[in-house]
Image (cartoon, grey):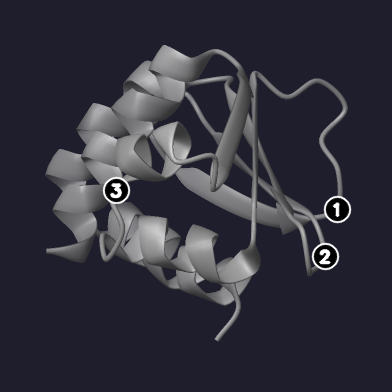
Amino acid sequence: MTSYEVLEMVVNKLNMNSSLKEELKQFAGKTFQFKPNNGPEYYASFGADGTAQISQGNSQKPDTVISADDQVLSDVITGKTDAVRAFFMGKLKVSGDVFLSQKLVSVVKKATQ
């Protein structure tokens, strides 16, 4: 399963959980671009009501860009790999608003537990 497919499943869980959607409101208007080294690019964006959306392709103005091997991205999304550890080991690269991406990982963890 690709990281896009994994994130798509997580986004569906987030959108069905009212308390998590409430937490996602902090990301309203924000976009996270994902750039797998060995797969197609995609991005996640958030509406004012906390609804998350995932789309294939490139965002025009992402707030954060996350690059890694597709498997590393999948493992970070599912919580199998700690995002901070992957970042410091050089397996995950983040540009833009790094702290925003840390906040997102925190909310995603709640959906994957």
- Front residue of this view, candidates 64 and 47: 64
Q: Which residue is mark 2?
A: 40
| Circle 1: residue type | Gly
Amino acid type, mark 3: Val
The quadrant where residue 88 appears? top left
Q: Position of residue 36 (x, y in %)?
A: 71, 58
Q: Secondary structure at mark 1?
A: loop
Percent x, y of residue 44: 60, 44
Which residue is depicted at the point 36% across and 33% down? Answer: 104
Among the two numbered marks 1 and 2 on one chain, the one whose residue lies closer to the N terminus: 2
Question: Disc 2 residue type?
Answer: Pro
- Rounded to the nearest angstrom, the CA distance separating label 1 from label 2 is 7 Å
Q: Position of residue 91 (x, y in %)?
A: 54, 48
Q: Which residue position is annotated with label 1?
A: 57
Q: Nearer the viewer, residue 85 or 8?
A: 85
Residue at 20%, 42% in the rendered image: 20
What kind of element bears circle 3?
Answer: helix
Q: Which residue is mark 3?
A: 108
Of circles 3 and 2, the one toward us is 2
Mark 1 or mark 3, which has the lower sequence index? Answer: 1
Going 32% across and 40% down the picture, which residue do you hit? 85
Circles 1 and 2, Cβ within 8 Å, touching? The answer is yes
**Element at badge 2?**
loop
- Cβ atoms under marks 3 and 2 closer than 8 Å: no
* Earlier residue among tags 3 and 2: 2
